[in-house]
Amino acid sequence: MTDLLAYQYVLIALIFIWSGFVRSGLGFGGAALSLPFLLLVTNQPLVFLPIVAIQLLFFSSLTLYTSRRGSASGLAQQIDWPYLKKAMIILIIPKLIGVFGLLTLSNEIMSIIIFLIVGFYAVTYLLNKTIKSNPKLDVLFLALGGYMSGTSLIGAPLIIAVVTNHVAKEQLRNTLFALWFVLVWIKMAAFIWVGVDLQLIHQLWLLPAAGIGHWIGLKAHDYLLRTDSSKFYRVMGAVLLFISTLGVIRTFW
């Protein structure tokens, strides 16, 4: 990522601010709602995914640490460990298959997969439809979410749809962050094992950018919870659907 034009670096920084805002403001979707924009700037999934993965590790760790310090019950009581282990048993194989696909498929195929998955999410936002699971779909949703997490770190909506049905509300956020922490570490281990460039030098300016967005998102989080967010999601869905469609067209032509 050293041969880009000045305006591309500015766009990438702005997208990472957006990513940080979404992650802390909405509680999920930092990768899913930023990768399509990044791939339109430059079509290099294996450049951006290590950067996003490291930031997920950093902010997940930060969230878990602050939760531990701010709670008298301790972090262990805030995570549903039995369900976390049960979910990981289902997630691990699809996750590894997804990581293998990421490392072997071309940039064009990976980008199309990302654009199509995000396009699906965009339609659900546009129609104001929540992805919901049930006992018959739990294993399928976790497997698909694990695979998507392995390929592109955008399996969160499917995984959340399952976990919310099995974990108490007061344990949900930290259980999810613990789950993201484990899943991202699996991906990072694979990156290190095969020698993928982790783009650490670019964290010097992109981590602070995401940090700015994270801070703004924390300030906006309570407001977003209090207000009717359906309009926000519809607008976001329309934008993501446009970007995903444009990305698929540009990849082919």
Image (cartoon, helix red, strand yellow):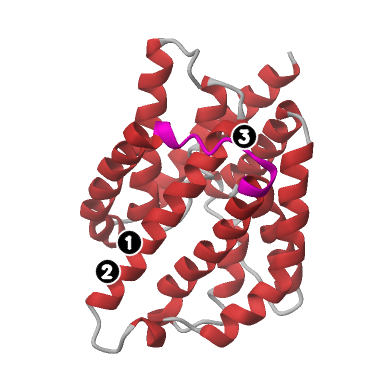
Within 10 Å of disc 2 (Cα), the crowding (few <14, some 14-19, many 20+) is few
* Residue linked to disc 1: 62
Q: Do residues under tags 2 and 3 come within 8 Å of each other at their CB atoms?
A: no
Closer to the camera in the image, 95 or 215: 95
* Amino acid on which disc 2 is placed: Thr
* Amino acid on which disc 1 is placed: Leu
Please tell me which of labels 2 and 3 falls first in the chain: 3
Is residue 26 at least partly visible in the picture? no
* Residue linked to disc 2: 66
Tag 2 secondary structure: helix
In screen coordinates, is 114 left or right of 173?
right
Displayed quadrant of residue 112: top right
Within 10 Å of disc 1 (Cα), the crowding (few <14, some 14-19, many 20+) is few
Q: Position of residue 194 (x, y in %)?
A: 69, 43
Label of residue 219 in the image: none
Is residue 195 magenta-colored? yes
Is residue 101 magenta-colored? no
* Residue linked to disc 3: 46
Closer to the camera in the image, 49 or 245: 49
Residue segment shown in magenta:
192-202
Closer to the camera in the image, 63 or 114: 63
* Amino acid on which disc 3 is placed: Leu
Within 10 Å of disc 3 (Cα), the crowding (few <14, some 14-19, many 20+) is some
Q: Position of residue 181 (x, y in %)?
A: 50, 63
Q: Quadrant of the C terminus?
A: top right
Q: Which residue: 74% across, 51% down?
A: 98
Please tell me which of labels 1 and 3 falls first in the chain: 3
In screen coordinates, is 185 left or right of 137?
left
